Image: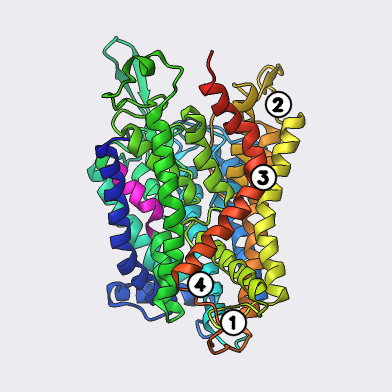
């Protein structure tokens, strides 16, 4: 690692932490309905939306009604996106005259964007019209992000309230999150990105002449508006096929910094929001500290692995000496304008959050450099995680941690004054078991046969899904299901996923990985809201202390290690041993 690279990582983390408190305060004000002065001009449009939709802000929901509203809202969004993709050839803003997508691709993409996953089995600039990108995908980028934040708000209310039968009103929560938080921040970021050269236009693609005298088609479109919310909403779906490695989606080091900050900005700030809403900001700082304790070493680990490069490369052996720092590192699949440090940092941030955008190809990372992003997803994407979804996943782990502490001392566990009993632990067990089941079972089925070959649609010829055999090919499949099951959306590439089996299998993985977690989380919220608050005593475990941070981190790492290390040993670990073997 170089001093320059470490400085860039340090600046990034410093800016992120500086922004967490003010944004976290603002979001707490919004979620508690206090209409901060900065957003007061939006109160009129908010009331208008409620009148049109027939929503009463003074009527709250129990957890079952809240869950039903979440599922209904997301099902409607999924259906709308599916219809847009199937009929895009008949819809406006299609200057390239793209045809309708196939049913399996529309199924996969609709689930992907409704569930905040944004897995993409297609190349955006060669498949989707401007209308599909805007009215279908970009709209869902807002609404799926708002859904995660609304569910988090319900869980926090469950912890903050006592003897309450309700956890809020989903329609009010999703409206306020979208109107006061996601729309204004996305507008500011989109304008800033345009200033850096991110394209924003409805013009048709243009043809340019290269220096060699050849013609090249340059794809355009309303890119900046989609990039802003894809980052801030931890969606990650790129307008272009190569995502934020594309020079018109992420052209400069400054745009790269802004987009990376946007990935973790809201998830980090929500920790402070949590502390404010439970009237103890120390709780939020403790959760954020646990996230950083895991995140920072993994960032440095990925950076170190990529900076070390491949020892089999002759250039490495030539430059390897007592005085050489091996500045080049592994530059395969990386953009020169970003370099090793920013590529490793982005890869770690995008998989710590359920973002999935990329500015480098993860398939070209070293085995250990690729293992770290994969494992971050497999932890459940709770280290920052998606907007809302990351923190409610982390709070479930906090509940498990206090339960373990209670077992150690023979005392009924408590979290924020609420006793953690059998029902909460059953729901928490579902939350932490669903995604490993989806990931490992899906990977196992794929490697047995269905995910190894397919019939090409145009010729019917049987082809291999994998461009790489052996351990790396297994890693590509494991990464795909880890990404889908944990609602990330990034890919190892090298895997032909745009065919019926993978489109359906990964679509189902995204569906289960999102909604089979939301429902038990809301069940926990409802159960905790109904309980009486227990006053703290000498036997109460302080959940804002360094000791609790260590216990929480240990619980997360233990669950992650026990669940996924055997699978990782078959992929990236074996590949690393093969790479360093003397030949």
In this view, the mark in front (3 or 2): 3
Q: Is residue 256 magenta?
A: yes
For numbered disc 1, what is the local secondary structure? Answer: strand
Query: Can the viewer see residue 353?
Result: yes
For numbered disc 2, what is the local secondary structure? Answer: loop
Q: Check contact, mark 2 vs mark 1: CB within 8 A.
A: no
Q: Check contact, mark 4 vs mark 2: CB within 8 A.
A: no
Q: Earlier in the sequence, mark 4 or mark 2?
A: 4
Task: Report the predominant secondary structure element of the magenta stretch.
Answer: helix
Q: Position of residue 300 (x, y in %)?
A: 39, 43
- Residue located 38% across and 34% down the image: 245
Relative placement, left or right, of 418 versus 2 is right
Residue 72 versus residue 534: which sits nearer the camera? 534
Q: Check contact, mark 1 vs mark 4: CB within 8 A.
A: no
The residue positioned farthest toward the front in the image shown: 322
For label 4, the residue is: 153
For label 3, the residue is: 439
For numbered disc 4, what is the local secondary structure? Answer: helix
For label 2, the residue is: 452
Q: CA distance from mark 4 to mark 3?
A: 28 Å
Q: CA distance from mark 2 to mark 1?
A: 49 Å
Up-down relation of residue 338 to residue 159 (above or below): above
The figure's colour scheme reads rainbow
For label 1, the residue is: 418
Relative placement, left or right, of 257 versus 142 is left
Residue bounds of the magenta highlight? 255-265
Classify mark 3: residues with Cα within 10 Å, few (<14), some (14-19) or many (20+). many
């Amino acid at each position: 690692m170089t001093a320059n690279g470490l400085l860039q990582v340090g600046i990034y983390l410093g800016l992120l932490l500086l922004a967490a408190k003010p944004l976290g305060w603002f979001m707490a004000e919004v979620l508690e309905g206090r209409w901060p002065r900065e957003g007061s001009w939006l109160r009129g449009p908010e009331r208008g939306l409620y009148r049109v939709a027939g929503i009463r802000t003074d009527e709250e929901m129990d957890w079952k009604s809240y869950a039903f509203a979440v599922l209904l809202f997301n099902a409607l969004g999924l259906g709308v996106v599916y219809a847009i993709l199937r009929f895009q050839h008949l819809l406006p803003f299609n200057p390239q005259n793209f045809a309708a997508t196939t049913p399996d691709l529309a199924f996969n993409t609709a689930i992907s964007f409704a569930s905040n996953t944004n897995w993409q089995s297609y190349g955006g600039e060669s498949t989707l019209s401007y209308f599909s990108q805007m009215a279908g995908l970009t709209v869902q980028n807002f609404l799926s992000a708002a859904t995660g934040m609304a569910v988090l708000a319900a869980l926090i209310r469950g912890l903050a309230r006592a003897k309450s039968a309700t956890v809020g009103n989903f329609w009010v929560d999703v409206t306020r999150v979208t109107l006061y938080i996601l729309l204004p921040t996305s507008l500011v970021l989109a304008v800033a990105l345009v200033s850096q050269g991110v394209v924003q236009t409805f013009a048709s693609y243009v043809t340019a002449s290269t220096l060699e005298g050849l013609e090249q088609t340059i794809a355009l479109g309303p890119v900046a508006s989609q990039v802003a919310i894809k980052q801030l909403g931890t969606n990650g779906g790129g307008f272009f096929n190569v995502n934020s490695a594309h020079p018109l989606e992420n052209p400069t080091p400054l745009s790269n910094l802004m987009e990376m900050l946007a990935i973790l900005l809201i998830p980090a700030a929500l920790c402070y929001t949590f502390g404010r809403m439970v009237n103890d900001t120390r709780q939020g700082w403790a959760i954020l500290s646990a996230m950083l304790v895991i995140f920072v070493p993994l960032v440095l680990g990925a950076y170190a692995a990529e900076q070390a490069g491949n020892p089999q490369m002759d250039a490495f052996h030539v430059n390897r000496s007592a005085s050489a720092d091996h500045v080049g590192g592994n530059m395969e699949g990386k953009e020169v304008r970003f370099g090793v440090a920013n590529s490793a940092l982005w890869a770690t941030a995008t998989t710590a959050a359920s973002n999935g955008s990329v500015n480098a190809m993860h398939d070209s990372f070293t085995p250990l450099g690729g293992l770290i992003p994969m494992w971050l997803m497999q932890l459940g994407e709770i280290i920052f995680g998606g907007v809302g979804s990351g923190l409610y996943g982390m709070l479930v782990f906090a509940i498990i941690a206090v339960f373990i502490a209670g077992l150690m001392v023979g005392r009924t566990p408590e979290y924020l004054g609420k006793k953690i009993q059998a029902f909460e632990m059953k729901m928490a067990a579902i939350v932490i078991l669903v995604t490993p089941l989806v990931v490992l079972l899906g990977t196992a089925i794929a490697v047995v046969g269905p995910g190894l070959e397919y019939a090409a649609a145009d010729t019917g010829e049987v082809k291999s899904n994998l461009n790489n055999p052996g351990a790396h090919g297994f890693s590509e499949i494991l990464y795909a299901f880890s990404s889908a099951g944990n609602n990330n959306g990034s890919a190892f590439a090298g895997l032909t996923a745009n065919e019926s089996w993978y489109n359906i299998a990964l679509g189902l993985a995204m569906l289960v990985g999102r909604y089979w977690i939301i429902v038990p989380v809301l069940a926990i919220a409802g159960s905790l809201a109904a309980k009486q608050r227990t006053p703290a005593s000498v036997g109460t475990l302080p959940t804002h202390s360094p000791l609790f941070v260590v216990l929480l981190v240990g619980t997360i790492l233990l669950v992650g290690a026990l669940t996924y290390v055997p699978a990782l040993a078959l992929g990236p670990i074996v590949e690393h041993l093969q790479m360093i073997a003397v030949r």
